[in-house]
Amino acid sequence: MVSALHNPPETPDKKADGAIAAAVGAGGLSFHPAAGQEGTAGRAAMTPRGEEEDIEGRQLMAKRRDQHLLYIHRCRFLDWEPRAIVCMAACASGRMLAVARESGEVEIRLVDEKFRVAGVVPVPGGNGLIRSMTWSRQVSESQGRLFVGSLDTSVFEIDVPGLRVRRRQDSYGGPVWCLAADPHRDLLAVGCEDGSVKLFSTADQGFEFSRALPTVNSRILSMAWQAPPSPRDSPSLFVGAVDGTIRHLDARTGHSAYRMTVEAKNSAHPPLVWSLLALSDGTLVSGDSLGAVHFWDGAMGALKQSFWVHEADVLALAASAAGDTVFASGVDSKLVCLRRPSQAGAREPPGAPEDEAWVLAASNRAHSHDLRALAVVERSGGRGGEGRRSSLLVSGGVDTKLCTYSVASFAHNRPRYIAPYPYYPVASVASARGRRLLMMQHSRKLQLWGLGGFQEETALCLQHEPSPLLEIQAVKGQLIVSSSLSPDGRFLAYATTGTLRVLALEVGESEGGGAEVDRGGDGHARPRVLLRRNKLPALAGRGGEKDVKALCFSPDSRSLVVGTGGGRVLRAGLKGSLVEEAIRDTSLESEEEQGVVRLSCSQDGRLLAVGRWNGDVELYAVPASSSGEDTGSLSLTWRLPRLDSAPTALAFHPETDILVVACVSNRFYVFDAAGQRLTDWSQDMGHRLPRELLDRHDCIVGVCFNPDSPQAVVLYGFGFVCYVDLGRPPGQLVQILPASHPAALAQRASTRKRQHEWLPTRKQKKQRGEAEIAQVSSNKVIQAIEDNDMGGTHGRRRSRGDSLVQEAEERSLPPGSDVSEQLNGKMVKEDDGNDSWNFKMHLGYQGVVAVEALGPDELLLVEEPWIKIVSKLPDVLHRHRYGT
């Protein structure tokens, strides 16, 4: 569904829309607020109050041009919104964690790689309907099979390597509320709306209905398998229902041996048993709608202990592998840890046996909203820790973020947050034919915006405000998987869970050269947008159009490259038919296919880089005729060697065949694709990358080049933007901006002990005089001044030598410049021969979604601050706080 935005629901935020928010020097990042950020975008930034001020402004802009600054447009008006986490499940090996969101998407995260998202599998019709998820038992070296239950009466099996839905099976009992896989047999239990439990066989890679257990006449909300005491005994299945009962079912006969009734306390209605957990020692744990966690004897059905630790429903339970630690979470956003006395370090209750006593060990509220999902995963120990495993608890809920905790030190360590921002490119830009376009991808819609240019005569200001041009809605029940905008802005392609569309895009222009506009009901003028749909034949092969995972236009906008979850790469002429291309070696035909998650095409269109979900990167040659049109089939030319970790971003240089590959470890490698080798810079300097980049918890998610500076590369993650000059060595220091950031203050504090190596002593000041003091390296001078102005001296009285240094620096500033503006990381100068500050990291941005090049010395930065996401979340459970 395509609709032009003649009457948009809301206007963009004029305070931050499209404002040029930073200027980046050729030697590093020099960020400062633009004029448009202080007032209405497009309004003159400086009101001339005299000819003298105008001359000073022109001199300042000329100086900026001489320094070869990089201007950044900072966008916050796109309203990118993540969805709540519904459920989670970790595979038996602990290598993968599946996270289901309310939008119907299932994320496959790799635990040992900073929980990075290896791929997303959209479940058909799963918007708000997914309620449960589980992995089947692990067989040999496989990670098990992933099953998803939906309220649309379906059970889906996810093809994890192919990143697609493999098959769908009806539950034969109505909406599916819970799933439970037998850890010892190839059997899957499905809890249904009609109160029955359906058993499905998963043996021999199949998925077939086996039998139905007798109904309990009440909706089943939770289930848990309990291992039999001996192989001769029948396995037990516990089911929790809405009538406040927990029934023990014999999986072979289907008979209920006994029933446990949850205490209703002061409630007039029976509690809902939302979660069940069976421990290895035979103990059964339940969580209900009254906020209680009960411990039961699984063999006799007797209640052992109860904890009323929550103020509302207990929605999720999880336990450590040893079964000595239990975690509970719910609507009140509290996460509770219960342990045995021997593990918690507390004394057991008098008269209670050691194996029956549990105590409240700790609790916290790292989340702000309902905490719906918990999972305990095992991961390797890391460097030098082969063979060691550590248990991690992962929590998620309505606030869309993930938190990880160490199970062993839950009460002492703070959690680590994993941002919900997208791991894949969600923004595409086109800056041709005099119009600058931005396309933003959401889960169910695409937005096309027109961006204004800027003028730098007397100040930075936008020519016109960003304007919404087009909105494309996905068909109901489908999700947008991938999208791309051609570099010349003539074509738009997007893939949903059901189809692939290629649209011809025309932005109307008047005869006088200006933009032809439409005026909607709000009176705002917007360029007229026309769309034409290109009819393409259906994709052949397994999955077809439902299997598309990645899209990429060629730089000349003549062809579209399509990557599928089954591992195929296809190429379509924009005026021709879709042609399948050969993409794999004959030696790999027998191997399991790996889905395509990244695509990047070289500037001349002769090379194509393909990234797969397992971390492989392949290069293919694109044959071309004398006319420049693509002909023939793709041929594999080089498979890049395995890197230290899986790649997260690919990007070709805009002028050469240089390929930059960023990895999970935040190391990046520079390859000469034509020569099939690492470049000299990467060979000599790749092992000298700064710790400030390598030690970050968030990964590099994108790589961008400045077309007007061939040696410059911009790396960005969710919380940082890093500028690197590939023509210089990494250096020993990293400049962190803004100067007031806590990381920058900590860096200066750590280097303060070494200041005596370069600051002149009192005796040297008397001998050399004030003139020689001015010859100190500008970087070091500015660093010394920053330490004093930002409180780096910690109350120490500034010496006369420091004052002389500041006075010498002030004399070197251009006319009309302010010292304070020079200090806060805004216009840092450095000598060309000084390599200490090659890496520039700006940590002042929050939630960087995308960074794209708009033109020479221009970048577009799409930002979604966390506080903006929180403001869109629903209300939380009211809790009385003391003094309120």
Image (cartoon, rainbow, N blue to C red):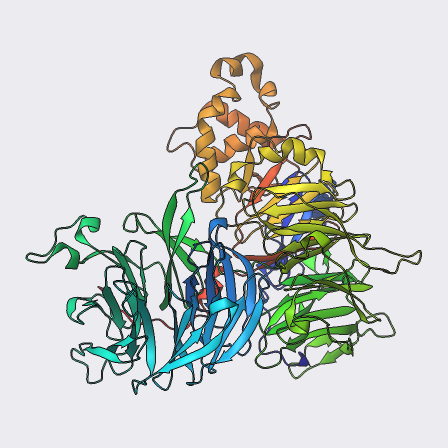
> Foreground residue, 325 or 533?
325
In the picture, measured across the screen, residue 286 lies left or right of residue 710, that is left
Residue 509, compared with residue 834, is above or below; it is below
What x and y, as percent, mark residue 585?
Answer: 72, 53
What x and y, as percent, mark residue 567?
Answer: 66, 61
Q: Give the quarter of the image for residue 810.
A: top right
Q: Give the quarter of the image for residue 732.
A: top right
What x and y, as percent, mark residue 531?
Answer: 76, 77
| Residue occupying the point 55% across, 76% down | 124
Figure quadrant of the N terminus: bottom right
In the picture, measured across the screen, residue 674 lies left or right of residue 300, that is right
The single residue placed furthest to the right in the displayed view is 626
In the picture, measured across the screen, residue 95 lies left or right of residue 395, that is right
Q: Is residue 331 visible?
A: no
What x and y, as percent, mark residue 457?
Answer: 74, 52
| Residue occupying the point 15% across, 50% down | 346
Residue 518, compared with residue 91, is above or below; it is below
> Foreground residue, 22 or 132?
132
Residue 125, compared with residue 787, is above or below; it is below
| Residue occupying the point 51% across, 77% down | 127
> Foreground residue, 409 or 813?
409
